[in-house]
Image (tube, grey):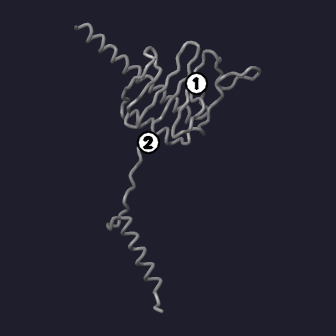
């Protein structure tokens, strides 16, 4: 039976594996970076508002359903800098289901929490990412929840500005006809 020099064999094997993993050039081959998943903000309705949903994609595209006054589906594009900031804040706080929030609805017989809201007029904002859902980020109990709520509010403002600009443009187009 032939003897095998195990040190030489391991050295050769390691060298071949290193070459395979680095493309033979010595530097590791970078794994492709996965595109972040869509993030969904669900805003509940109340006595005076209808519920609506924002789905924002990493490329900045936003799909909105239930938005007043249309009630239908609307598409918009958020500024790239905003999208990068939002995703940075989301990805830094995964899983979103662990983001600390306060109870938002005052239960009969309970003392007011840090975010007491009347049940009939209050809305809640839930963030869903990668199949997990946060508590009500409009009742933050941590800096992370506060920042994500501010991101959501900025998104809502951006969408309102986009819709207003589109409406003004449409009114102007109709006036010129």
Residue at the location (47% across, 20% down)? 66
* 35 to the left or right of 91: left
Residue 36 is tagged as 2
Give how far across and how far down residue 167 sits, in percent. 34, 14
Rendered view: 14 above or below 41? below
Q: Quadrant of residue 100?
A: top right
Residue furthest toward the left?
Answer: 177
82 or 20, which lies in front?
20
* 119 to the left or right of 85: right
Rendered view: 92 above or below 22? above
Residue at the location (53% across, 32% down)? 127
Give how far across and how far down residue 45 sits, in percent. 56, 19
Give how far across and how far down residue 134 sits, in percent. 58, 34
Q: Secondary structure at mark 1?
A: loop
Mark 1 in CB contact with mark 2 (< 8 angstroms):
no
* 21 to the left or right of 89: left
Q: Which residue is mark 1?
A: 124
Rendered view: 100 above or below 18? above
Q: Work out how far the residue at label 1 is from the one at label 2, CA to CA, in angstroms.
A: 24 Å
Residue 15 is tagged as none
Quadrant of the image for the C terminus? top left
| Sequence order check, earlier mark of 1 and 2 | 2
Give how far across and how far down residue 119 sits, in percent. 65, 18
Q: Quadrant of residue 111?
A: top right
Residue at the location (55% across, 36% down)? 144
């Amino acid at each position: 039976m032939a003897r095998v020099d195990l040190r030489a064999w391991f050295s050769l094997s390691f060298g071949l594996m290193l070459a395979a993993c680095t493309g033979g050039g010595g530097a590791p081959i970078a794994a492709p970076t996965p595109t972040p998943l869509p993030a969904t903000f669900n805003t509940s309705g109340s006595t005076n508002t209808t519920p609506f949903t924002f789905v924002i994609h990493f490329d900045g595209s936003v799909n909105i359903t239930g938005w007043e006054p249309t009630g239908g589906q609307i598409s918009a594009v958020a500024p790239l800098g905003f999208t990068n900031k939002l995703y940075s804040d989301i990805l830094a706080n995964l899983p979103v289901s662990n983001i600390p929030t306060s109870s938002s609805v005052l239960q009969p017989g309970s003392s007011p929490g840090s975010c007491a809201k009347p049940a009939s007029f209050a809305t809640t904002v839930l963030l869903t990412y990668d199949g997990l859902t946060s508590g009500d980020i409009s009742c933050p109990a941590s800096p992370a929840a506060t920042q994500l709520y501010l991101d959501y509010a900025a998104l809502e403002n951006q969408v309102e500005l986009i819709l207003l600009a589109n409406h003004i443009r449409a009114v102007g187009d109709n006036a010129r006809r």
